[in-house]
Image: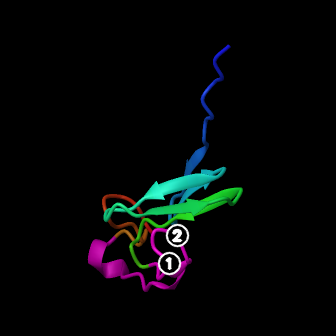
Amino acid sequence: MPTEPIRRRIALTDDGPILVHGPIEVVLTDGKTMISDRAVTALCTCLRSSRYPICDTSHRRRVRNVTARGSGSGMDRGGRGC
């Protein structure tokens, strides 16, 4: 009897990383792979992380410019805040 594929839960956050539940393997643009055996892995979406593609919470330290967009929401990169 074939086994069912494992479904990974991926959670999008309003102003931060993408949270992937369960062990994962990430293939980087240069072809290298990164493996995470954590229960939850936070993937960086702001490109500021010194541990990219893993989030290091650098998005929390950025200065938000309220007048640049006028909304004060802190959103950038097509609606993602991180």
* Quadrant where the image shows the C terminus: bottom left
Left or right side of 20 for 29: left
Tell me the SS state at disc 2. loop
Residue 41 x %, y %: 61, 61
Residue 56 x %, y %: 55, 77
Q: Is residue 26 magenta?
A: no
Q: Main secondary structure of the magenta part?
A: loop
The image's mark for residue 51 is 1
Quarter of image, res 40: bottom right
Q: Residues within 10 Å of mark 1 (few under 14, many from 20)?
A: few
37 vs 10, nearest the viewer: 37
| 45 is higher (above) or lower (below) than 11 | below
The residue shown at (56%, 60%) is 35
Tell me the SS state at disc 1. loop
Residue 66 x %, y %: 37, 79
Q: Amino acid at mark 2?
A: Ile
Q: Indicate how the structure is coloured in the image.
A: rainbow
Q: Which residues are magenta?
A: 49-70
| 63 is higher (above) or lower (below) than 55 | below
Q: Amino acid at mark 1?
A: Arg
Quarter of image, res 1: top right
The residue shown at (39%, 66%) is 75
The residue shown at (31%, 58%) is 78
Do callouts 2 and 1 mark residues in contact (Cβ within 8 Å)? yes
